[in-house]
Image (spheres, rainbow, N blue to C red):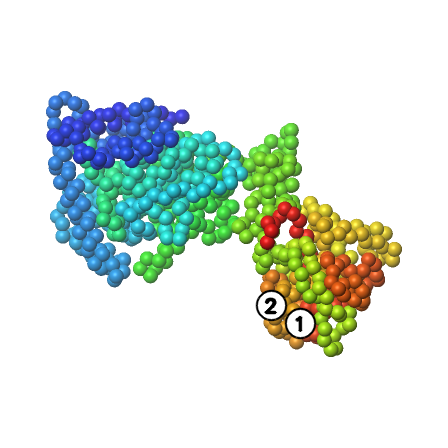
Amino acid sequence: MKQQKWALWVVVSLAVGMLACSSGSSPEGDNVPGKPDTDTIGDTTSDVDLDTGDDPGGSDETPDPGVDTPDKGTPDNGQEPPEPCETAAMTDKIEAATTAMQEAKAAYQAKRESGEQEATSAAIAYLKTKEAVSDINTDGSAIFFTWASSIRCGIYTAPMSSFVGSYAPQPPPPAPSPINAPVGSGKAAVYSTLPPEEGSQNTHQEIRRLLTNAGFDVAPAFEGPAVTLEAIRRISKLDVVYIRVDGATDDEVFAFLTGQSPTGDLCPMAGEFSSRAIGLGTTVDDDGTYFTIYPNFFKGFEFKDDSLLYFSASDGLRNDSLASVMHEKGLGVFIGWNNSISTGTEDERTNVTLFERLLQGASLGAAMTELKQEDESFGQCSIVIDDEEVLAELDYYPKLEGASIRIVTGCDEDSECLQEPDEQVCHSHQCTKKSCVLECQQQGCGVSSQCPELSCGTCADNTICDSNLKCMPKEINDCVGGWCYIPAGSFRMGTFGLGFNDDEKPIHSVTITRAFYIQETELTQGQWKLLNDTNPSHFNTCGDDCPVEMVDWFDAANYANQLSENEGFQKCYQFSNCGTPLGTNLDCVVTFAGLDCRGYRLPTEAEWEYAARAGTTSYYYGDVDEIAWYYSTSHNRTERVGQKTPNAWGLYDVSGNVCEWVNDFYSATYYEDHCKSGCKDPLGPSNGWQRVHRGCGFDFDPDEVRSASRDKRAPNSGFMALGFRLVRTVTEPEFPPL
């Protein structure tokens, strides 16, 4: 570990400052630069020891006098400090520079409605009238100039949020479930001079929370005025640093605003001003004046090995002026933006997301690559300045060395993991037993039964981790991942009308006692091919989005078993003496495990009609032309699923497109014989030679795509307008009572 020696320099500096001020001390309550105000900085860092001994500066290394080192005056020998360190003169110079910035800002504001360019030109024109002003330049988001040949000043013209003057620290959000990541072992801190954008999350508090939950020793947040020069000096002692401030490029050199105003005895800082280690700055939307920091400020630092600094500010990596200095002094990697950014957009889409991935154990290079693959717009921020789009991209320095840095222990490849005594794989950037990973892949959520410390994932707010450890919808009309939740309830099944089939009569009351999940659409050819090498379908005009057809009842039931086995669930069908393919043997016996089976199955006829009606009692749940592909609306073929209007419970194509196999044997008189006075959870006849299908297809008449319409077919035969959709019973304790 590299040693640091700032303590001596600070002691000398403070001594010189006391001698230089004839009155003896700065006004009470002033936050004297170079010495943290105990009401602000002392309390802010109380939870984490960032100091060594009496070192208030965050570095134990004496700055190299040959590298832009400020002149700190002389020891206490009874003599006044030499020029330029005269307190009164320094104070006057700072006040004059501040006045010039404020007046130039007023000129800018007077022309602001005419556009950024006009406003910038007005401010520059004013500055050119001042004899003490030199070296004026602008990067498009700030105007910089030098006052009296020594003090560098910046007017930040494109702040993306209100500044520290209106900053009100917010309490941290409630602690979330711990991140599934190795425990962090280092020190971390978060600095922010910017409050959250309206409607955005409190990013710096969120990042503090993430770091804390991962096990880091995190200092209380440095917020607003607490982001002082002295607080910034402390970053060399940290493993992970996040800084969210206003930044800009001054003549190819990056500069950023602190939250500290220049008050008290400024004489000891004369050398830092003249060497352009620090400067002064303001924003066009804020009345305050604040210290700014330049790369030279960090030339006396020694950073911790493999440390990571995330600089959330405009222009942090427009060039490597700051990053290269920090890297030369030991910083592992510098993350920043290569252009102007909007803090609201950037905060929500990038900062937190990247930290989450890093805390899962990913190296920086792997995290950036993965996130861009998942969302090609990740790490990009687009804003409009003077009607021109400005695109910024997140990057890091140095590219090669920085890519391998991690902030917690992790992995990127299976080869990095041990194979003895148990085979391990790199899962979510952690070396984990392969058997546990396979278990989680089948589960989808909850925790691994084999590895209780391994989270298999959490569910979104509109889903619940059900008893089979899958994220499933939890409310009516809440379809998630292609599955919809259907509550238990009662309905009137069947229909009555002239010309309709007698097997739909009589209308009878049916109670469905078990809630169930049902597929949002008919099973597609793409879903079929995930578990089968061949596609039996006749039509392929819409590719994988067409419903699968030409499947018989045995095909459908066997697919349900395949899916159950693939996801580690109970199989709901047992086939005996059924031949190959299934159903070719006339002695075939199919045993159904019942409605409490935890795996996938075909819906009962009653469940199907209950779900299709979705509370309606008419022939259709809507206008037939709007809800169904039948002979008048289709193109004499199947159509891509999910194109027509869904019913109230979110189901598509329950009328038309393809007919759908259900679980029941067919009987023309079953409901007349067994349910005339009402029934619960009817399963249909116990045997028969035909199975029921419902919904009918693209080549049927509108009368045949009614909610109550029934049809039947031999279970070992299919046709080009016959497919299916699956259901799974909801089992307790998945849902609270409705």
Q: Within 10 Å of the Cα at label 2, are there few (<14), some (14-19), or many (20+) other Cα atoms?
A: some
Horizontally, residue 94 falls left or right of residue 680, namely left
Residue lying at 12% horizontally and 48% vertically, measured from the top left = 131
Residue underneath mark 2: 644
Kind of residue indicated by mark 1: Tyr
Q: Determine whether 307 is above or below 75 in the image.
A: below
Residue sticking out furthest to the bottom: 498
Kind of residue indicated by mark 2: Lys
Residue lying at 50% horizontally and 33% vertically, measured from the top left = 183
Which sits in the foreground, 609 or 528?
Answer: 609
Residue 681: where, in percent of width, then height? 73, 57
Can residue 308 be seen at all in this image of the molecule?
yes
* Quarter of the image that includes the C terminus: bottom right
Residue 118: where, in percent of width, then height? 24, 59
Horizontally, residue 735 falls left or right of residue 592, namely left
Residue lying at 24% horizontally and 25% vertically, measured from the top left = 11
Q: Determine whether 464 is above or below 26 in the image.
A: below
Residue underneath mark 1: 619
Which sits in the foreground, 274 or 469?
Answer: 469
Which sits in the foreground, 32 or 513?
Answer: 513
